Image (cartoon, helix red, strand yellow):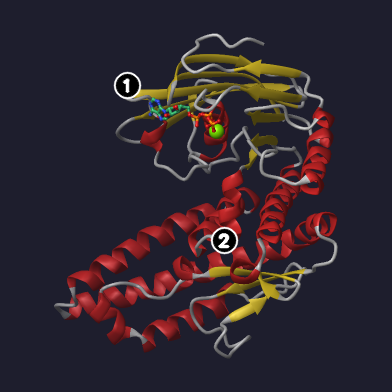
């Protein structure tokens, strides 16, 4: 798929910005604060409904304006569609697909984008939430039926936490907690089994990417449940994920172990007023050369893994959807050494469409088909 035009109104620093793209690689250049990242952020938002900078929607709205709008013309095969999003400073965003309201999750967004950003380092160095978000975002594309599960799970968790916080005051409250716990465990089992399976499907691509970047070190991935899994036992509560799809735990067994673990913690949870175990507390452990990459990896190894995690995700989405997402590279070449740069350039050159931002010239081998210069506050960029 590729995007031929992008129109921004009141998106961060851009009052009005109209851009045209070709199917190959476009370079967006401009000084700091020219609004380069903003362009990528807007495109990515159309695909996911969230900012890759992990900020709330209202941060996309130009200060003092009621709403931001983003519009793109998207091509897939011979079909062209127009996606239009209105993101208000307050309230929920609205997306129109060829003029008709589009409910997120009812079908994959016609805009698919893989973003590479220096902040990806957080995928390896950061807290578990960043890795959970990485997995879940990918899961919603690869296994769309789990979107309903994830949304239900979020609601159930909020209800369960509210009840625990308020305290169990009656028999009816105890009954409600039982119902919520049962539902929470069941939905958790489905989501965690989905995440586990996703890691198994990602692993070959991840290994291939690491192999190309850092051939001496082998990568292993383990899904770390926040509760004991009798299959793995021990303190680690960690299951090494095999690259064999279908080899992970079943939803029902995960649900049962979680239910049992929650039952054993009833007093503790009542005291703390929150749900202490579940997918919202899980993590993914990535090992490179037998060492935990998060705590023991060098900066270079961590960058390798961050890049490899994005490349693997990009490959999997391409395989599952049968269309290659647009590659969005935000200021990447300033951060990468020659070897990693070369691997990324190779991917860009083999890609359908890429949009790359840079403050100065990126590697020559990229050979963009067009360069657009953005200037802070300018309405019409020089092409
Ligand atoms: N809500 C907003 N309203 C108006 N301006 C904003 C808003 N949010 C951010 N900005 C400004 O938008 C500008 C563009 O930000 P952006 O991150 O897109 O720039 P950039 O070209 O990627 O810069 P850099 O090279 O430093 O990464 C910044 O100067 C920022 O302060
Ligand atoms: Mg930027």
Q: Is residue 165 left or right of residue 265?
A: left
Ligand 1 lies under 8 Å from the Cβ of mark 1? yes
User: Residue 110 at what x, y percent from top left?
Assistant: 62, 32
Q: Nearer the viewer, residue 39 or 267?
A: 39
The picture places residue 308, in percent across and down from the top left corner, at 72, 54
Residue located at (76% from left, 72% from top):
289
| Above or below 150: residue 20 | above
Residue under the image location 59 percent in, 22 percent down: 30
Query: Of residues 244 and 365, which is closer to you in this image?
Result: 365
Label 2's element?
helix
Q: Which residue appears at 75% of the width and 46% of the height? A: 337
Residue 125, numbered label: 2
Res. 59 image quadrant: top left
Disc 1: which residue = 65
**Lower position in the chain sequence, tag 1 or tag 2:** 1
Quadrant of the image containing the C terminus? top right
Which x, y percent locates residue 304?
72, 55
């Amino acid at each position: 798929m590729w995007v031929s035009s992008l129109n921004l109104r009141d998106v961060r620093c851009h009052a009005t910005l109209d851009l045209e793209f070709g199917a190959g690689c476009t370079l967006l250049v401009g000084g700091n604060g020219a609004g380069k990242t903003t362009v990528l952020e807007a495109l990515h938002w159309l695909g996911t409904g969230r900012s890759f900078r992990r900020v709330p929607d209202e941060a996309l709205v130009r200060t003092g304006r009621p709403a931001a709008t983003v519009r793109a013309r998207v091509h897939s095969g011979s079909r062209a569609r127009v996606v239009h999003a209105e993101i208000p400073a307050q309230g929920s965003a609205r997306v129109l697909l060829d003029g008709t309201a589009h409910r997120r999750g009812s079908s994959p967004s016609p805009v698919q984008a893989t973003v590479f950003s220096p902040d990806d380092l957080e995928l390896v160095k950061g807290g578990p939430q960043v890795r959970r978000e990485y997995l879940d975002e990918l899961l919603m594309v690869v296994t769309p039926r789990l979107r309903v599960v994830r949304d239900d799970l979020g609601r159930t968790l909020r209800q369960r936490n509210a009840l625990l916080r308020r305290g169990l005051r009656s028999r009816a409250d105890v009954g409600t907690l039982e119902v919520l716990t049962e539902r929470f465990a069941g939905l958790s089992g489905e989501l965690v089994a989905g995440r586990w399976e996703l890691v198994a499907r990602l692993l070959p691509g991840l290994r291939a990417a690491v192999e190309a970047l850092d051939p001496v070190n082998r990568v292993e991935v383990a899904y770390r449940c926040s509760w004991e899994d009798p299959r793995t036992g021990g303190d680690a509560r960690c299951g090494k994920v095999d690259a064999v799809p279908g080899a992970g735990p079943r939803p029902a067994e995960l649900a049962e172990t979680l239910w049992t673990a929650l039952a054993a913690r009833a007093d503790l949870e009542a005291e703390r007023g929150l749900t202490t175990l579940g997918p919202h507390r899980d993590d993914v452990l990535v090992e490179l050369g037998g060492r935990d990459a998060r705590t023991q990896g060098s900066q270079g190894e961590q960058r390798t893994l961050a890049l490899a995690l994005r490349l693997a995700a990009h490959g999997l989405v391409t395989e599952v959807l049968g269309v290659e997402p647009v590659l969005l590279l935000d200021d990447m070449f300033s951060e990468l050494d020659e070897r990693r740069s070369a691997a990324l350039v190779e991917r860009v050159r083999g890609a359908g469409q890429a949009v790359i931002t840079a403050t100065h010239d990126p590697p020559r081998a990229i050979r963009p088909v067009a360069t657009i210069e953005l200037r802070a506050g300018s309405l019409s960029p020089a092409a």
